[in-house]
Image (cartoon, grey):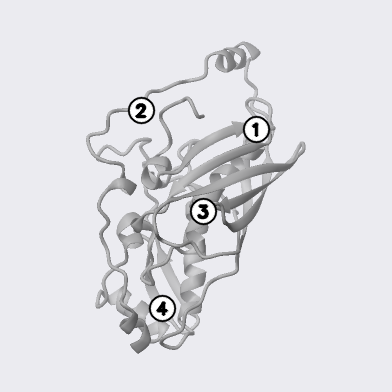
Amino acid sequence: MLESGLGPPIRYLFGLAPTSVEPGGVTFTMPVTGWLLFPQGVVSGATLGILVDAPLGCTVQTALPPATPFTTTEISLKFLRTVVPQGGRLTAKGRLIHAGKSTGVSLVEVTDQVGRLLAVTSTRCAILPRVEVPWEVTEQALKHPPRLPEPDWPSPHPYERPVTGEVLPQETWDGTDGLGVLRSLITGDLPAPPLTRFCGIAPVDADAGATTWKMPASEWLCAPIQGRLYGGAIAMLAGTAIDGTVQTTLPGGTAFAPVDLKVYSCARFHPTGVTWWPGER
C-alpha cells in the first residue's frame, strides 16, 4: 500500500494517505485545508469520518489471510477537541483490538500537528468468507505486489487547489437563527461554504428539527475496493445532517459542537457508471 504509488480517488481529493503499516496497526494522515470549512468557519467533527475510516478498516485487514474480504459495519466517533482550521496535518493511528473468524474490531486515535488528542474512534468489521483463489496466484501476488507509478497529473490535486466558497461573518450568525441561516443557504441568499464547493455536500430542505442534505455519489469519493463509495464519506454526510438538524433549533449567536457520532452501515453503495480515475483533474 505504501509502495504502490497510485492510490484511490479519495486519496487525491482530500490528501488522505497511509504513512505506516505494521501487523495490527496502520496510520493515515490528512491535511487540514480551507476546503474543509463549513459556514461557521470550522472543520466539523463529521469530516473526521473521511480520515478515520481508512485506518479503521486497514488495521483489521493486516490480520486477515490473503483473499479475505471484509466490510466495516459501524463507525463510532467521540470528539475531545475541536479541529482548529490553521493548516497542518491530522494523524489517525489505528490499533487492532480483535480479529476472529467473522468479526474484527479496531481503534483509532486522531491527533493534530502538535500531538493533541482530538478524537477516539472504533469500528466493528464483518469478515466475509475467503475467496477461492489458486495458491499459485496468491503466491505470485505476494511475491510481486503491484507497484503502479503515480501519473504526472496536469493539474494540482483538488485539495491543493485555491479554495473557493465563503465562511459567514459573525454578524450573520448573531442576527439570524440557525434555521434562517440554513434556509438562506438553500435559496442561495447566502454564499456556499468551501466544503460545498469541494464535494457538493449541501442542505436541500430545512424545518425546525428536520433537515435533508445531498452529496453527489462522485467517483472522487471511491474507496480502493471495487469502486465502492468510501464509508467515511457516508459518515461525513450523516454527521453533517445531524449537526444541521441541531442547528435549526438554535437562536442567533449560539454556537454548538457534537460530542460523538455513530454511523451504522447497512449496505455498500456503488456509484453508477464509475470510472476508476476521473478523466479531468
So how many labels did they put on this image? 4
- In the rendered image of this protein, does residue 67 appear above or below residue 40? above
Residue 206 is tagged as 4
Any part of residue 75 in sight: no
Residue 62 is tagged as 1
- In the rendered image of this protein, does residue 143 appear above or below residue 14? above
User: In the image, is 221 to the left or to the right of 24?
Assistant: left
Q: Residues within 10 Å of mark 4 (few under 14, many from 20)?
A: many
Give percent across and percent down for residue 49.
52, 54
Three-letter amino acid code at the position of disc 3: Asp
Residue 150 is tagged as 2
Mark 4–mark 1 Cα distance, whole angstroms, equals 43 Å
- In the rendered image of this protein, does residue 244 appear above or below residue 79? below
Three-letter amino acid code at the position of disc 2: Glu
Mark 3–mark 4 Cα distance, whole angstroms, equals 33 Å
Three-letter amino acid code at the position of disc 1: Thr
Which residue occupies the foreground of this view, 273 or 24? 24
Q: Residues within 10 Å of mark 3 (few under 14, many from 20)?
A: many
User: In the image, is 199 to the left or to the right of 48?
Assistant: left
Q: Residues within 10 Å of mark 2 (few under 14, many from 20)?
A: few
Mark 2–mark 3 Cα distance, whole angstroms, equals 28 Å
Three-letter amino acid code at the position of disc 4: Ala
